[in-house]
Image (cartoon, helix red, strand yellow):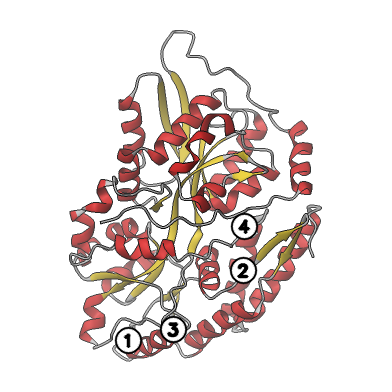
Amino acid sequence: MFGNPPKRKPRSILITSLVVAMAAGLSACSSGGSQGSSEPSSEGGPVEITFQSWVPNIDKAVDAFNASQNDVKVSLETITAGPDGGYAKMLSAVQAGNPADVAQLGYDAIPDFLVNNALEDITEHVQGDADKFVPWQWETGVFNDKVYAVPQASGPLGQFYRKDIFDTLGIAYPTTWDEYYEAAKTIRASGPDKYITAFAFNQAPWLIGLSQQGGANWFTAENDAWTVDIDGEETKKVAAFWQKLIDEDLVKIEADFSSEWNADMQNGNIASWISGSWADAILRGTAAETAGKWAVGEMPQWKAGENASATWAGGSASAVLKGSDHPKEAAEFALWLNSDPESVSILTSVGAGWPAISDTSSIASLQSDPEVFAFYGGQDIWDIFAASDKNVDNSWKWPPLSSTLFASLSDNVKSAVESKTPLTAAYEKTQADMVAALKAKGISVR
């Protein structure tokens, strides 16, 4: 079903020399490097390492690793998702000199951790395995030719939708945003509480993904300086479209993952959800009683016949935190977790995202997953996300201070919605906020 996807040019990610210098300067205030050796414990037992992650049911992959060998024992520490407090906990532990060994990091967070001198250089332990991974995903953890993270999965966007509702209302799947607008009007007219989707003002990664899919490229770096274009014409086009949906009451203003949103997904008041491939597991858990009523489609296009896609915050990786007592074993676990076929199959099933490995033909859960396929009326949804991943614009770069970007964008969009001011103004405010934040850190901005 799935073979090797076409080779793509690696995404070149630039961390400026100034940022690298900042990280070096911070090292005097941090743990200062690996504290111990990579030798087994004094009792002669296995090396023990800790892995921090928020991915539901990832313990199944950890258990598989522990069962596969006797030299290293991994203990899983479940933490709050990174942007919701997990990253702050990791960085505090690094500063205190008692970090976990391996940590789950979004691709967008890697530059932040480098600025804080919070990652081990694991080049010598993993560089020989680079060809196992999709080039652009591997490059998300490479800076100045040094490897700091092993990619796990990306979050290519697709649209989960209630096919039964669309069919009942005679709505053909919307392949363009114009068709999406017409579908939104039909669904809204079908009942006082019915909407095509929720406008998730709380989700900066969702808002960013919509802009990326619309052709925006917010950050570019050249000659040790960043260009910031958050409020460019492509973003304004996307913002204006969603503003129209809001003004005409065609989308529900609602934070996703809230109790109200969960209920709306269960009762059909919300008929679709644009999200990353990993959202399958969340949807099946949230709305289990709607099994068989859903389907997945590719992203609507701004121009008919195009195939533009995007991701939800890029994806996720496994990194070795600065100060790990066992960086070698930690790096080897990160590599196994994200490249061993059994592990990758588990990760895919539990909703970690679209695999970062280049050859997915040996991933059992992508070839046949009866539980997943049954929920979507027998549809093999992985075909959709394979195409979406292939069509992602890989020139997108994440800057330092992505946490600042996320907070500013979600705050500004929420404020615009509540005050009924234009969404375009929210992006203009986020542009100003981000430029100021980068300059405050001594990072050059054009």
What residue sits right under mark 3 in the picture?
177
Q: Mark 4 belongs to which amino acid? A: Trp
- Mark pair 3, 4: CA separation: 26 Å
The label shown at residue 187 is 1
Where disc 3 sits, the SS reads helix
Q: Which residue is mark 2?
A: 217
The residues bearing labels 4 and 2 have C-alpha atoms spaced at a distance of 10 Å
Q: Is residue 236 left or right of residue 433?
A: left
> Earlier along the polypeptide chain: callout 3 or callout 4?
3
Nearer to the camera, 325 or 426: 325
Give the spatial CA distance, label 4 vs label 1: 36 Å
Residue 159 is situated, as x and y percent measured from the top left of the image, at 36, 71
Q: Residues within 10 Å of mark 4 (few under 14, many from 20)?
A: many
Neighbour tally class for label 3: few under 14, some 14-19, many 20 plus, Cα within 10 Å: some
Residue 264 horizontal side relative to residue 309, left or right = left
Element under disc 1:
helix
Can residue 370 be seen in this snapshot? yes
Give amino acid for label 1: Ile
Instruction: Identify the residue at horizontal 63%, vertical 56% (top origin).
Output: 402
- Whether tag 3 and tag 1 are in contact, CB under 8 A, the answer is no
Q: Amino acid at mark 3?
A: Trp
Q: Which residue is mark 4?
A: 398
Looking at numbered disc 2 in the image, what kind of residue is underneath it? Asn
